[in-house]
Image: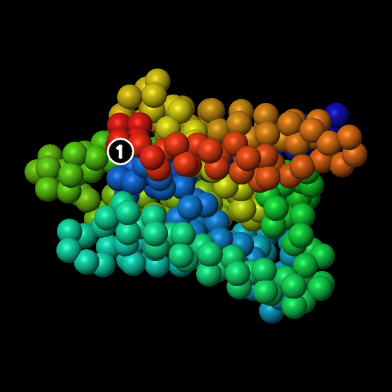
Amino acid sequence: MWDLRVPRTVLGVIVGSTLGVAGAIMQAFTRNPLADPGILGVNAGAAFAVAAGAAAFGVTSLSGTIWFAFVGAMVATVAVYLIGSVGPGGPDPLRITLAGVAVGAFLGGVTSGITLLLPAVFDRMRGWNAGSIASVPSDLFAGVVPFAVLGLVLAFAVAKPLNAIALGDDLAVALGSRVVTTRVVSIVSATLLCAAATAAAGPIGFVGLMVPHAVRWFTGPDQRWILLGSAVTAPVLVLASDIVGRLVLHSGELPVGIVTAFVGAPVLIALARRRRASGL
């Protein structure tokens, strides 16, 4: 109970809350209902950096990989946002989504190439790369919690300005909101949260996409309630997926990332077919 179940549950709560809030932040500052750490390539950037760190420097401990994950997530986030901002009209939700899918596919391919060419790296990363909370790192709290807490604090600090940005940049400026500062803080917050989750459990997709939409149906468009609801609801989804993954097979278990993909893929298709998704 204390050596296996409780640490695994704590890891699920941390990973779920960070991914849920990161997805809500990304959807808010990009005004893109399809934004989430997986679709926008942030998880792929963190995973690529972790694989590169393991291949080049032999870094496998959580306290070491967290910094590689942070740098990779930050570079991917900035690259996707800049690519999606090119062209008339500034940042466009469709361009940002397409840029995220392209960057994520490219980095995912490079990561797969690294792990296949280097068997030692593949052995260390094959379980982690599927997105799993089965193994709890010994330095979990020292390595992940500071990043997660700082990311959550920054996210809630910009919740109110994000409400103004939802009305449009011009109106947000007229209301006294610092649009550029809010977006920078939002990017840093989302990057910290994604780095913490990816370094601890691997790239788990769709949690940041599904949970904010479900919460928004009950709370409305106020980002303060959306962030709070996502922080509470996302761990429930991750832990429920973990339980399903343990029960669905007679021998062994499915990683959380595979279970959330089975649930999240239909949700993504349904959202993509809607003209207005969850009020965004």
Task: Decide if residue 12 is on the left or right side of residue 224.
Answer: right
Query: Who is closer to the viewer here, 18 or 280?
Result: 280
Q: In the rendered image, which quarter contains the C terminus?
A: top left
Q: Is residue 43 left or right of residue 155?
A: right
Kind of residue sitting beneath label 1: Arg
The image position of residue 114, as x and y in percent, is: 69, 74
Residue closest to the eye, 49 or 146: 49
Q: Nearer the viewer, residue 240 or 272?
A: 272
**Furthest-top residue in this view:** 218
Residue 11: horizontal and vertical position, in percent?
69, 40
Q: Is residue 180 above or below residue 87?
A: above
- Residue 179 visible in the snapshot: yes
The residue singled out by tag 1 in the image is 275
Residue nearest the observer in this picture, 93 or 268: 268
Residue 14 location, x and y as percent? 61, 39
Q: How many neighbours does mark 1 have within 10 angstroms: few (below 14), some (14-19), or many (20 or more)? A: few
Name, please, the residue furthest toward the front. 273
The residue that appears at 26% across and 57% down in the rendered structure is 91
Residue 113 coordinates in the image, percent (x, y): 67, 74
Q: Secondary structure at mark 1?
A: loop
Please give the name of the residue rendered at 23% of the width and 43% of the height, measured from the top-left corner: 165
